[in-house]
């Protein structure tokens, strides 16, 4: 009997699909049933070939061999996952397999994963596509009843392949050119470099910022305070003497309410989450990195099946999904969400005007709960936090607007005017979804909202006090992951032309929701940026890189043009061949600019400690998890940890401990002053019932966690990491 081969992206997803389809016979790398054989990739099984596969001279990094422009890109099997590739290949060529069902992630990268495997394996069998936005049994069953011809997604694959090839051409060539030119491990890319340029530009603004004093006048009345405003409605004065003159003119005089304005207003609920907005909120509230949030979302999507597909750039759903909303509400009617979910279910029909918009849904709709009933006890605390954000936003967007009365009060003292603002809640609406957990964004205004007493126009009031307050202008804030994601999505900080701004609004900005987390992680892994609390700060290496790369590689405008053309390729209205021809010409231009440049790169983080393997002086760098010393010679790649952040907690203040030293001399240190030798820590952690093996496993997990500086392996990341594999995947050196 002929069977269909189902190709999933991950083993966990494949097992769930197999269970839903009734496949129960386990084989090596696959699960079989009466009608289906389900197999899986392990992410990418196939990737673009290394440069040396095209020309042996490329095996040595040199300026003379650049640019590398293979006439036709070749695919190779990734060595580490070759066993699973061979299993998939053999299944594809089995006589009883009549068709292929592509069930990789429903997106551009998932399409690339599957198509490259089929191309490399030489499969000519007909193919259909499973395109679903959640992993519930119901969604999988309905998806298999509505399989689409794979040909409908061919242009999406061409777009993904064009992106990968362009990144290979630009990324590998410019990286080699910079590294060889300056004898330092430097990398650049079409998205990574303009993102770093924004961080460096912000740091330069902060460095050049000169704070200025300003003065405001505050008058206190019975039950409220008011701020002086001038004829131009500005509340800040640049001259202290002017402020003092105004103060003297109002002292000892009563106030009169000359204007009391009351206006009923509504605030619509926020739109549902896309990935970028969810990553922003998770960073603001829980300090999760973009990468952590995506990983937690993947678990909630694939393993727990509680949330829909995470890698989406849409914040709306389509009209045909409206009938599913009651069931989704019933699935979240648990715990703290029960009361509000039941309220919405009773108040039929559901208000969907802030959630439904077919025109704003691309490949996938917004992130919302599935119909799967949640068991919150099965979730980790981190998964629970992400689930909480999505459920509360889902309840909010189905709710009525927040209604309030906005009160503006103007009080005249002598000839001067003072202003106050207040807000009276009339109907909480969507804000019920957040309750006390809701944190309002603070207004950048000297006139803050407050509770105002009942005052009528013409009322006279005594002035309790009046004083001049001094403030200083503040520099722009450094980026956090939350604000950097916003800047990547809307890169308006850069000096762009009006046409470029309009173009970027029609694209996803810098990168895509699916790739931004990896881009940020790569900046940390390459030691171009470091963390200071929540803030992202460029290192000397990052600032120097921006000073030596070609100018147009730093601009978001270039990436915008690329993304625009890639979007056209995905729709079938542009040719990938023309796009790649442009990329080859552009790569040649960039390499020539790097070689001709007279810019210098200087290691300013060199220590007096010599590398034990090659004798060069080690560089001290701050990695994402701690401080390291590494060899500047990329061929050597020696590294050692000086200190690293652990998940162990201080017994005194309960903050995370830092591990310092090596071997038996390792100790834990806390900012509060606590010090503890490793041996003493092990004894304390052991307590009653903990074995030595448990302690050893804990320590090994810590070291593995802290030594893993590399971001997730995208097609380009795999290529850029190839030269590191020869040195046992040691990190990029500054």
Image (cartoon, rainbow, N blue to C red):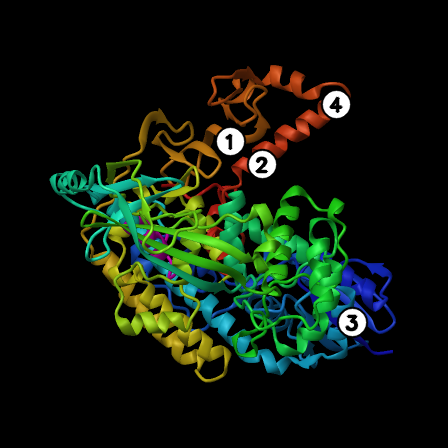
What is the CA distance from the residue labelled 1 to the residue labelled 2? Answer: 12 Å
Residue marked by disc 3: 141
Local secondary structure at mark 2: helix
Sooner in the amino-acid sequence: mark 1 or mark 4: 1
What is the CA distance from the residue labelled 4 to the residue labelled 3? Answer: 46 Å
Label 2 neighbourhood size at 10 Å, few (<14), some (14-19), many (20+)? few
Give me the residue at 50% from left, 71% from top. Answer: 161
Local secondary structure at mark 3: helix
Give me the residue at 56% from left, 76% from top. Answer: 357
What is the CA distance from the residue labelled 3 to the residue labelled 2? Answer: 39 Å
Residue 524 part of the magenta-drawn span: no
Residue marked by disc 1: 645
Q: Is residue 87 visible?
A: no
Label 1 neighbourhood size at 10 Å, few (<14), some (14-19), many (20+)? many
Does residue 476 appear left or right of residue 529 in this picture? left
Report the quarter where the C terminus lies: top left
- Relative to 7, is 525 above or below? above
> Residue 696: horizontal and vertical position, in percent?
67, 26
Residue marked by disc 2: 704
User: Which region shows up in magenta?
Assistant: 187-201
- Relative to 50, is 723 above or below? above
Residue marked by disc 4: 691
Label 4 neighbourhood size at 10 Å, few (<14), some (14-19), many (20+)? few
């Amino acid at each position: 009997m002929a069977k269909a081969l189902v190709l999933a992206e991950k083993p966990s997803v494949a097992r769930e699909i197999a269970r839903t389809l009734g496949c129960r016979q386990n084989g090596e790398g696959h699960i079989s049933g009466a009608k289906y054989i389900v197999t899986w990739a392990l992410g990418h099984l196939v990737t673009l070939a290394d440069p040396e596969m095209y020309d042996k001279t490329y095996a040595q990094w040199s300026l003379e061999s650049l640019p590398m422009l293979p006439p036709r890109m070749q695919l190779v099997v990734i060595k580490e996952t070759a066993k699973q590739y061979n299993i998939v290949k053999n299944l594809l060529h089995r006589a009883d397999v009549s068709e292929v069902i592509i069930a990789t992630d429903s997106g551009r990268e998932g399409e690339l994963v599957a198509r490259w495997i089929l191309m490399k394996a030489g499969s000519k069998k007909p193919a259909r596509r499973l395109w679903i936005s959640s992993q519930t049994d119901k969604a999988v069953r309905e998806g298999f009843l509505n399989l689409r011809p794979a040909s409908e997604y061919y242009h999406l694959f061409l777009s993904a392949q064009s992106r990968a090839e362009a990144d290979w051409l630009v990324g590998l060539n410019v990286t080699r050119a910079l590294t060889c030119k300056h004898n330092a491990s430097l990398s650049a890319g079409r998205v990574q470099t303009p993102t770093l340029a924004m961080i460096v530009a912000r740091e330069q603004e902060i460095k050049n910022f000169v704070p200025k004093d300003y003065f405001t006048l505050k008058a206190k009345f019975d039950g409220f305070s008011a701020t002086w405003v001038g004829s131009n409605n500005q509340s800040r004065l640049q001259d202290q003497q002017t402020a003092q003159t105004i103060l003297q003119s109002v002292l000892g005089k009563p106030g009169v309410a000359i204007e009391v304005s009351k206006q009923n207003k509504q605030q619509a609920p926020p739109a549902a989450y896309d990935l970028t907005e969810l990553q922003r909120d998770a960073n603001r509230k829980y300090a999760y990195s973009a990468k952590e949030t995506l990983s937690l979302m993947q678990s909630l999507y694939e393993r727990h099946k509680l949330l829909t597909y995470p890698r989406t750039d849409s914040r709306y759903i389509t009209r045909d999904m409206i009938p599913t909303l009651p069931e989704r509400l019933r699935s979240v009617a648990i715990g703290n969400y029960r009361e509000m979910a039941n309220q919405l279910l009773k108040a039929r029909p559901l208000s969907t005007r802030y959630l439904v918009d077919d025109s704003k849904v691309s490949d996938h709709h917004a992130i919302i709960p599935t119909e799967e009933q949640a068991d919150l006890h099965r979730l980790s605390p981190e998964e629970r936090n992400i689930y909480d954000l999505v459920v509360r936003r889902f309840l909010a967007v189905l709710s009525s607007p927040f209604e309030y009365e906005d009160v503006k009060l103007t009080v005249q003292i002598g000839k001067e005017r003072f202003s106050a603002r207040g807000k009276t809640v009339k109907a909480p609406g969507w804000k019920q979804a957040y309750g006390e957990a809701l944190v309002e964004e603070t207004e950048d205004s000297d006139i803050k909202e407050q509770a105002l007493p009942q005052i009528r126009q013409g009322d006279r009031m005594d002035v309790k006090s009046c004083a001049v307050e001094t403030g200083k202008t503040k520099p722009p804030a450094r980026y956090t992951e939350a604000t950097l994601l916003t800047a990547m999505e809307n890169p308006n900080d850069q000096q762009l032309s009006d046409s470029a701004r309009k173009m970027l609004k029609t694209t996803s900005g810098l990168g895509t929701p699916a790739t931004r987390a990896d881009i940020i992680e790569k900046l940390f892994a390459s030691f171009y940026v470091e963390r200071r609390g929540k803030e992202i700060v460029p290192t000397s290496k990052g600032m120097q890189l921006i000073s030596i790369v070609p100018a147009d590689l730093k601009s978001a405008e270039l990436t915008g043009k690329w993304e625009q053309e890639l979007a056209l390729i995905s729709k079938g209205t542009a040719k990938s061949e023309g796009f790649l021809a442009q990329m080859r010409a552009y790569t040649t231009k960039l390499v020539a600019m790097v070689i001709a440049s007279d810019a210098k790169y200087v290691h300013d983080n060199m220590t007096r400690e010599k590398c034990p393997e090659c004798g060069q002086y080690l560089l001290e760098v701050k990695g994402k998890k701690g401080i390291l010393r590494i060899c500047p010679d990329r061929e050597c790649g020696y590294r050692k940890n000086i200190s690293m952040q652990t998940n162990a907690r201080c017994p005194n203040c309960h903050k995370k401990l830092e591990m310092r030293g090596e071997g038996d001399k390792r100790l834990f240190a806390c900012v509060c002053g606590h010090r503890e030798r490793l041996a003493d820590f092990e004894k304390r952690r052991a307590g009653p019932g903990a074995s030595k093996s448990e302690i050893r496993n804990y320590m090994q997990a810590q070291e593995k966690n802290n030594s893993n500086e590399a971001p997730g392996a995208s097609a380009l990341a795999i290529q850029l990491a190839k030269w590191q594999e020869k040195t046992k995947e040691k990190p990029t050196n500054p």
